[in-house]
């Protein structure tokens, strides 16, 4: 992998946008988040979505290779 390439899940723009969304939702529900919690929560959400996407791809590939019913 080229040194300039990185996965989208490690993008600072994506993480910043997710952290802003988490902070906005917390503010909407009047929840006071400690410093850094929005960034950690956003990172966890990105990791969860990525993992679920990979699981979905694996299930889809398995079903595509099985018998068609």
Image (spheres, rainbow, N blue to C red):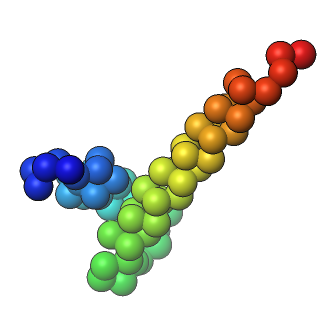
Number of marks present in the image shown: 0
| Above or below: residue 66 compared with residue 1 | above
Q: Residue at x 89, y 16 (%)?
A: 69
Q: State the residue in front, 21 or 62.
A: 62
Q: Residue at x 13, y 49 (%)?
A: 2
Question: Which corner quadrant of the image does residue 67 belong to?
Answer: top right
| Above or below: residue 10 compared with residue 69 | below
Q: Kindly tell me whether residue 46 is visible in this rendering.
A: yes
**Measured from the top left, where is residue 31 in percent x and y?**
46, 72
Q: Describe residue 3's horizontal placement relative to residue 36 as left or right.
A: left
Q: Which residue of the protein is positioned furthest toward the left in this rendering?
A: 4
**Measured from the top left, where is residue 11 in percent x and y?**
23, 54
Q: Which residue of the protein is positioned furthest toward the right in this rendering?
A: 69
Question: Which corner quadrant of the image does residue 23 belong to?
Answer: bottom left
**Measured from the top left, where is residue 16 in percent x and y?**
24, 58
Q: Residue at x 70, y 24 (%)?
A: 64
Q: Describe residue 68's horizontal placement relative to residue 34 as left or right.
A: right
Q: Which residue of the protein is positioned furthest toward the top in this rendering?
A: 69
Q: Residue at x 29, y 47 (%)?
A: 8
Q: Kindly tell me whether residue 28 is visible in this rendering.
A: no
Q: State the residue in front, 11 or 30.
A: 11
Q: State the residue in front, 5 or 9.
A: 5
């Amino acid at each position: 992998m080229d040194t300039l390439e990185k996965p989208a899940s490690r993008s600072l723009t994506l993480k910043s946008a997710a952290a802003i969304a988490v902070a906005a939702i917390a503010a909407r529900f009047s929840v006071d988040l400690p410093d850094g919690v929005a960034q950690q929560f956003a990172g966890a959400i990105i990791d969860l979505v990525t993992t679920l996407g990979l699981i979905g791809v694996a299930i889809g590939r398995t079903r595509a290779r099985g018998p068609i019913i």
